[in-house]
Amino acid sequence: VDELVRGLLGLVHELSTDRETAAAVCEAGGLAPLLALLEGRARCPYVRPLAAMGAATLDVLVELLWNLLEHSRDRAAAALAPSRSELVRCQRRANALYLLANPWDLGVLTGLLEEMLRRGYRHKDKELRNEVLIVISFVAKHPNARAACREAGLLRLLLRYATYGEGGDYLDPEDPGADLLEAPRPANFATTLEVDLELKRLMWSLLADLCAADDAAENLAAAARSPLLEALLVYLDAGAAAAAAA
């Protein structure tokens, strides 16, 4: 069964490389079974979660999602649609960003990211982890995603891991389930390796997107409660900033 799933994933991956077929995959509802497999909610009891099939299978899925999201972004930013129905198709029915910008799907992706932060210690694990975060960042740029990221627990996860080390192990005092979370493992994400520094930059960039919009007051308040500002100031070179301003 694993080989069948891998074969089907490979086929959908090939379809995702073309803009029009990528749109057709989204419009046909292709994202739902992919996320269900990722979470382990496949209806067939013989199908294992994708995460249990190895890093190579996850790598295909992440690249597949990346392709769908990138094509959707480019289509939505292209010239105006010739008709209302085509506009709805482009912005909603065939738009992976719109389709994934909800608490359930973002929760699945957040769960994958959290698992990789906890367990991924090899270099290739960390590279894949960063790619998962980039996929999430695609989705987070959709306006519907700002509240959904908070509801899915993504904002909490980002604030904890983006400030770890500089701000200690931060747990939001207004999060009732924070004390039940597993302690982070710094060797998996808080090193001076380039791949871990890239993770930090990606997390900061995503937090900026989630807090910058006019309707992101709750996200901004959560960030203000955290040691995020203190963590950012650690990396501020006052001398370089003064020279640049001169």
Image (tube, grey):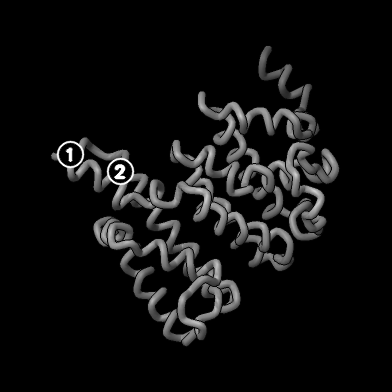
Query: On the rendered image, what quadrant is the C terminus found in?
Result: top right
Secondary element at tag 1: helix
Task: Find the distance from the CA under tag 1 to the CA under tag 2.
Answer: 10 Å
- From the viewer's perspective, is 34 left or right of 162? left
Secondary element at tag 2: helix
- Residue 119 coordinates in the image, percent (x, y): 73, 66
Residue 147 visible in the displayed image: yes
Q: Residue 230 or 240: which is nearer the viewer?
A: 230
Give the labeled residue for mark 2.
Answer: 91
Q: Residue at x 31, y 42 (%)?
A: 76
Looking at the rendered structure, the kind of residue marked 1 is Arg
Comes first in the chain, label 1 or label 2:
1
Q: Are marks 1 and 2 in contact (CB under 8 Å)?
A: no
Snapshot quadrant of residue 239: top right
- Residue 207 coordinates in the image, percent (x, y): 62, 37
Give the labeled residue for mark 1.
Answer: 84
Instruction: Tell me if residue 162 comes above or below residue 40 in the rendering.
Output: above
- From the viewer's perspective, is 171 left or right of 47? right
Instruction: Tell me if residue 5 comes above or below residue 21 in the rendering.
Output: below
